[in-house]
Amino acid sequence: MSANFSTPQDAEDAYYDAIDEKDLEAMMSVWADSDDILCLLPMMPAQRGTASIRKLWEPLMSGEVVLDMSVKHLAWLETGDVAIHLVEEHVQAPGMESFQIVYASNVYHKSPDGWRILMHQNSPTPPQTAGLEIPEME
Amino acid sequence: MSANFSTPQDAEDAYYDAIDEKDLEAMMSVWADSDDILCLLPMMPAQRGTASIRKLWEPLMSGEVVLDMSVKHLAWLETGDVAIHLVEEHVQAPGMESFQIVYASNVYHKSPDGWRILMHQNSPTPPQTAGLEIPEME
């Protein structure tokens, strides 16, 4: 798949669209093609490199997993050709009564082919305070 | 405190030394001085900006909290004036029988004053696999 994201936000939109659409090739097109890229999904071992990250996402993009995910922007940090976006992912899986909220940071790098993801990392939000810190961060 | 870290590793060493030594000023000298820096400690609300991050670390640097922490390097990623280090933090608090292992990523930026931290983020490791992925990542 040919993709050329002209802003970090374009790359981010493509990342979450790929999850919605269960499109593994679209997902992989958002990542920098490198042995050094890093992906830390909730409660899964950290993965490094294109091959490992493809293997990580492959079952999540299969027909059997259905994730209803929306994203809330918390903070942006840009310096030169690197951008960091901090978001909350609101995830609802089948059988879950309510959304689960997790933090996610996405680190983007501007390459000659456009902006790509270098690192994605999820962290749990403290249940008692999830969401409360948002006003401070905007 | 005047500090000028000539490599990302120098900044990282200073970050963990500051925790060992409970030195809040040394800790803050490692961070970029910016309203945009981000710190996500385990199960705490995400914090943004120098003032909020100082407030976050202040009680952790007090005499009452004792953390025995060692760090295991997992992966480095460098691009231009930005570096990302992924480590495992092995933490033992008083009363804990064994070390708790969490992932931590540190994103560094090279400024005219040397390398500083832009973002620190912890994530839990999956208990059944913590440590097992290390050989793949080195």
Image (cartoon, coloured by chain):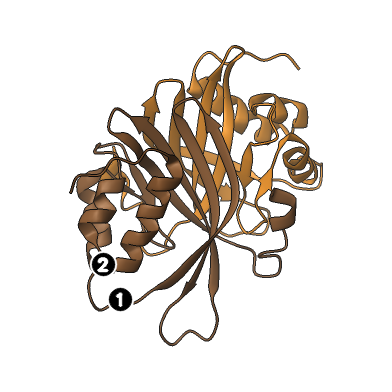
Chain colours: A orange, B brown
Which residue appears at 73% of the width and 34% of the height?
A: A50
Q: Would residue B2 be found to the left or right of residue A100 on screen? A: left
Query: Which of the 4 image quarters holds residue B43?
Result: bottom left
Q: Residue shown at 53%/63% (left/top)?
A: B102
Whether residue B94 is visible, yes or no, is: yes
Indicate the amino acid at tag 2.
Met
Q: How far from the left and from the top, in percent, is residue A74?
A: 38, 39
Query: In this orientation, which residue lies closer to the viewer: A74 or B65?
Result: B65
Q: Are marks 2 and 1 in contact (CB under 8 Å)?
A: yes
Type of amino acid under label 1? Val
- Label 1 sits on a secondary structure element that is loop
Asked if residue B24 is positioned above or below residue A80 in the image, the reply reads below
Q: Chain of mark 1?
A: B
- Marked residue chain, label 2: B
Q: Residue B48 appears at what percent x and percent y?
A: 30, 44
Residue underneath mark 1: B65
Spot occupied by residue B127 in the image (x, y as percentages of width and height): 65, 69
Do the residues marked 2 and 1 share a common chain?
yes
From the image, tell me which residue sits under label 2: B61
Say which quarter of the image contains residue A96.
Answer: bottom right
Please report the residue visible at 80 percent of the width from the left and 46 percent of the height from the top.
Answer: A59
Dot 2 falls on a residue whose secondary structure is loop
Distance from label 2 to label 1 (Cα)? 7 Å
Pointer 2 local density, CA inside 10 Å: few below 14, some 14–19, many at least 20: many
Residue A135 sits above or below residue A3 on the image: below
* Residue beneath the point at 76% across and 17% down: A1
Numbered badge on residue A110: none
Quarter of image, res B56: bottom left
